[in-house]
Image (cartoon, rainbow, N blue to C red):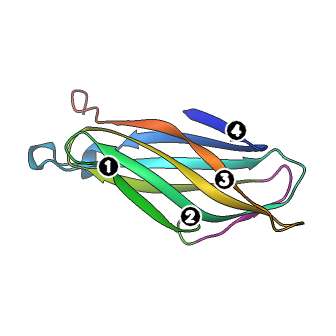
Amino acid sequence: MVTAVTSGIQVSVEVTYQAEFSSPHQHHYVFTYKVTIENKSNHTVQLLRRRWEILDAAESKKIVEGDGVVGQQPILEPGESHSYVSGCNLKSGLGKMIGTYEMEKIFDGKHFDVAIPEFQLIANIFHN
């Protein structure tokens, strides 16, 4: 698991290689990742947007942007957390992801970016 804290917002990511859904001989590798966002600040915040950079050893960098996470724009009171699971497909068994969330402080409407820590996508093809 990797973790980063920005402006009191902690983001932790845990990655799992999904061997049963992957086909290495067809250059198809599936990963899931669980993200936990914890509000350790004194302010209520809302996650508005996400921006991911996905690097695959077999391809050039991809940028994925959009509103919220898995169809949600969670509001987090101080001390609350939100977790979700998403996935990524690679053409190689080696890559990494890094990104940011655009957040808003509810009380004053100010927007700020929160770092999503870089994490590795490594297929464990020798033990499955």
Provide the residue designation for mark 1: 61
On the rendered image, what quadrant is the N terminus found in? top right
- The residue sitting at the top extreme is 126
At x 77% / y 44%, what residue is drawn?
A: 7
* Residue hosting label 3: 113
Instruction: Give the mark, 2 or 3, whose residue is nearer the N terminus.
Output: 2
Query: 113 or 82, which is in the foreground?
Result: 113
* SS for callout 2: loop
Quick check: 112 above or below 41?
A: below
What residue type is disc 2 on? Val
**How many numbered circles does the render carry?**
4
- Does residue 105 show up magenta in the picture? no
Indicate which label's residue lies in the foreground, 2 or 3: 3
| Mark earlier in primary sequence (4, 1) | 4
Whichever of callouts 3 and 4 sits on the residue coming sooner in the sequence is 4
Q: Position of residue 100 (x, y in %)?
A: 57, 51
Element marked by disc 4: strand
Q: Looking at the image, which residue is at 32% across and 49% down? A: 61
Q: Which residue is mark 2?
A: 69
